[in-house]
Image (cartoon, rainbow, N blue to C red):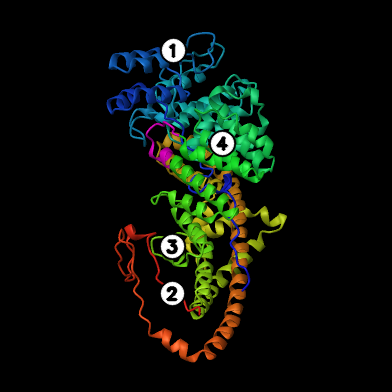
Amino acid sequence: MTNYRRQPARVLTGATLIGLIALAAPRDAAALSCDDIITMSQHGVPESVLVTTVKESGDLYTPDDIRCMQDKGAPAAVIAQAKTMTQRDEPAAATAPVESAEEPQGSDLDDDEDVLGQRGTAPAKLSDGEEETADGQEPEKLKEAVRQYRAKKPLAASLMLYELLETGSYPELEPKINYYLARSLEMLEMWHTAQHHYLNVIRRPDSQYFPYALPKLVKIARFTGDDTELKRIVTKIPPDAYPRNARSDMFYLLGVRAFDKDELSRAAKYFSQVASSSPYYLKANYFQGVIYNEQGKLKSAVRAFRDVYREDIEVFNDPRYLKEIEDLKDLALINVARIYYGIERFDEAANYYELVNRDSDQWPDALFEHAWSNFMQNNLNDTLGQLLTVRSGFYNEDQWVPEASVLRALTYFNLCEYSKVDNILLKFEQTYRPMHAEMRDFTKQYASSEGRKLADQAWGTYFGPNQKTETTLPKAMFNRALKNGELSGIVRHLDMMDTEEELIARQKSRWQDSLGPYLRKVIETDRQRYERRAGLLFLKEMARQTNKLADLLTQSEIIRFEVVDAQRVDYQYKASRTGVNDALDVVNIDFATAVEYIYWPFNGEFWKDELGYYHYTEQGSCK
């Protein structure tokens, strides 16, 4: 038989960090208000964690915030840390604000509760204290807009700021106008249009608002899980200009860009500059392991991945962030296992696969690859048992693992169960050939440079409002594509645009009729660009899966050919030993199990607590 051998899976990189995004950026430590601090303290959050969270939040505190903490009994160490962060968050202006003598235009927009339910209260994750005074040379309308923003009246503030921006009469003040318009939209949880206006500030690096807008842009990227825009601008800003609160994020993105260009040494240099207090620290270390592996430094790679797994990080009790850390640790284990598999130390690989948490999103992949390790060690009944879990209803509808059928067939081939091999492969080809044809034809449409320009249409074919209704492709294949972290981040951002349009439609008519059309146009213009980017990533993943499926179908044909040859040899053997075969057929075999296990025959029902523990008792037909 041809020596079939699974190629060791490539160590997971940034584009394939399953469940993360990938890179789905981890949320930053929550920005803490006085009330947040008191609430956390009352719920028993350790003082050291509070101090660290305050320090890393990047938010600056006003004297009122400090007094609030003191009055409500915040821990002394937290108050001391907050006092070191009481500088002005915005550039100071020359004179104090001038009070408006008349009722400001649009101020009644926020008189009733808006769609957020709390008169535009800023979300804690993206808020900060601001103590700017208005410049006496500025138009009164701008001063009043800032006052409305500070009074937590984002509808009134955003309307006045938009009207100033629309006139185009104050080009020198546009960075400030854009900045406060972004802050007001942020209060309304309109993340995309807020991001749009922060980007307008970033395009003016000479502005005094630049160092304040960039960290806000970083925070939105963390919040949404999509760093598309940051990647576009990261190389256009000199590292010396990175604000303190954004330095680690920007160096991390520089590292990712260098890695994607195969500039491994440069990427490693950037990743090494990510601070240990950054949410990207573990990901940077993970990439260091990937780089060592690419360079053939396997011991260093294993050491780096082990460090990621063992790293003990104190984080704010945000379930999403905690889950991303757990996922990254499981991915580190899988990559150590893959390295040992690649050097044919299959027993070591199996040990690391077993360490992956059963509740992890990575466990089905780890279990399948563990099955390969058992196959290579000739533990064929263990292989079949693990494949039974992968094929169960718990996973087969969500996990795209066509390779499982080929491994199952190879396992039965080694047990000389040739009729089973043939049945498995015929069913495999019948199922997957139509899928391969659809995937091949689809990717071929967009293979040219002209076709790639229409990638937004490729995205719409399967995900748009007019998506294709008839397809041979299962949900599991699309789930596999969406495990690409970069793609999943863009998808979440597109969903966020839809939500934002709904928010716009629910605001008061005067605001909606004036500012609404402008914001909708911003969203629609960007939507096509985001859909094109999503389409390109989806096509890339679809092409990869198409090639993989083509290879598996070819392997299936070769194995079926060798089944015929093996059956011929088997028939010749049996014909020459007629009496011996009859005697063997009547032997009764007792399949005993170890005393520490209870053996339950499988009755066709899958129970969650049994997954991963199935064991076959195939003796095989090899004579």
Name the element at disc 4: helix
- Residue contact at pointers 4 and 3, CB within 8 angstroms: no
Question: Is residue 93 shown above or below 321?
Answer: above
Name the element at disc 3: helix
- Tag of residue 386: 3
User: Of circles 4 and 2, which is in front?
Assistant: 2
Question: Is residue 279 shown above or below 485?
Answer: above
Mark 4, residue position = 284
- Identify the mark nearer the N-term, 3 or 2: 3
Q: Position of residue 183 (x, y in %)?
A: 48, 28
Q: Position of residue 382 (x, y in %)?
A: 44, 64
**Gap in angstroms between the C-alphas marked 4 and 2:** 48 Å
Q: For this rendering, which residue is in front, 9 or 35?
A: 9
Residue occupying the point 71% across, 55% down: 450
**Gap in angstroms between the C-alphas marked 1 and 2:** 90 Å
Mark 2, residue position = 619
**Gap in angstroms between the C-alphas marked 3 and 2:** 17 Å
**Gap in angstroms between the C-alphas marked 4 and 3:** 33 Å
* Circle 1 Cα neighbour tier, 10 Å, few/some/many (<14 / 14–19 / ≥20): few
Q: What residue span does the magenta drawing correspond to?
A: 312-323
- Is residue 548 visible from the viewing direction of this image? yes
